[in-house]
Image (cartoon, helix red, strand yellow):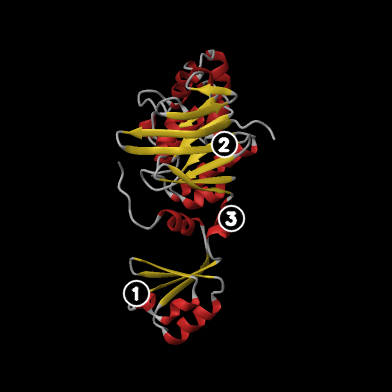
Amino acid sequence: MSEPLLDVRNLRKRYGSTAVVEDLSFHIAPGECLGVIGPNGAGKTTTIRMCLGLTTPDAGEIRALGLAMPRDALAIKAQLGVVSQFDTLDPDFSCVENLLVYGRYFGMKDSVIRERIPRLLEFAALSHKADAKPGELSGGMRRRLSLARALVNDPKLLMLDEPTTGLDPQARHLMWERLQLLLQQGKSILLTTHFMDEAERLCSRLLVLDHGRGIAEGRPRELIAEHLEPDVVEAYGEGALTLAQSPLTRLAARTEVSGETVFFYTEEAKPLLDVLAREHPRLRTLHRPANLEDLFLKLTGRQIREEG
């Protein structure tokens, strides 16, 4: 096997008495997209900040591109591309100027940056907005410009912290297309996201974090098969909640309630669906395969976590 582009071992970070990251280890291979998912406060952003040298770990080892963080922070950052949760584009500069100025931070010559700019704008589907300022762009356009800016130094590894948060479905899908192109070109990506469909679509492997610890890791479909029953039946409508205490639960391996919906997790859905149709015809039901959202909720719980 080739050496990982990013190798994190036994990482720890505490703020006061709170362990934000606790004994966390993972790696990213060349050409791989590792998705990091978890509830608010699970430690995702702190982990990225430590990998970028922005936050000093209390313990553990981070090696990126054959170098050690934070000792070789400048040399590592020269080979990274970063898209943070929130736009950091300069509002006074046009798209072209944002790319040009950012490239100068890497010590690149203006002639080299200008030669790359048309390709970057084309990649971001922003060629027609070259002279527009960020305030004149839609949210999706600004995120694509942030991604293009992160590519100005032709990085081997991209770190993307919730890159599609706040985007409408069309903008998200266009962003996904661009990220898939980068993976096809051999780039490696560390991606944090709250969108389970995004994680399943883009990620070779997933790392599930909760309370600063890695609680599961593997390929998306393999994790689903390992932790979940294959079929899910959702029942909702007037009287649905009584099903959670009824004999119907014997037809499922596991039953959960969320809001006004009862979730039946089962190895075989047909017997349950037949009984529901015969004995509870007024209830609405949905039969579907288990997915990453089910996995996320099983491993981390359904309780809402506040930021901070």
- 10 Å neighbourhood of mark 3: few (<14), some, or many (≥20)? some
Residue at the image position 42 percent from the left and 53 percent from the top:
300
**Distance between mark 1 and mark 3 Cα atoms:** 30 Å
User: Which mark, residue 221?
Assistant: 3
Residue at the image position 37 percent from the left and 38 percent from the top:
20
Q: Secondary structure at mark 2?
A: strand
Residue at the image position 38 percent from the left and 74 percent from the top:
244
**Residue denoted by label 2:** 27
**Residue denoted by label 1:** 241
- 10 Å neighbourhood of mark 1: few (<14), some, or many (≥20)? some
Look at the image and tell me in which quarter the N terminus lies. Answer: top right
Q: Secondary structure at mark 3?
A: helix
**Distance between mark 2 and mark 1 Cα atoms:** 43 Å
Q: Residue flagged by tag 2: what amino acid is it? A: His
User: Which mark, residue 6?
Assistant: none
Q: Residue flagged by tag 3: what amino acid is it? A: Arg
User: Nearer the viewer's eye, disc 3 or disc 2?
Assistant: 2
| Rendering quarter of residue 183 | top right
Q: Nearer the viewer, residue 238 or 167?
A: 238
Residue at the bottom extreme? 278
| Rendering quarter of residue 89 | top left
Is 176 placed above or below 16 here? below
Q: Secondary structure at mark 1?
A: helix
From where the camera sits, is residue 151 visible?
Answer: no
Q: Residue flagged by tag 1: what amino acid is it? A: Leu
Compared across the picture, whether 218 is left or right of 305 comes to: right
Q: Residue 226's x, y, as percent?
A: 57, 58
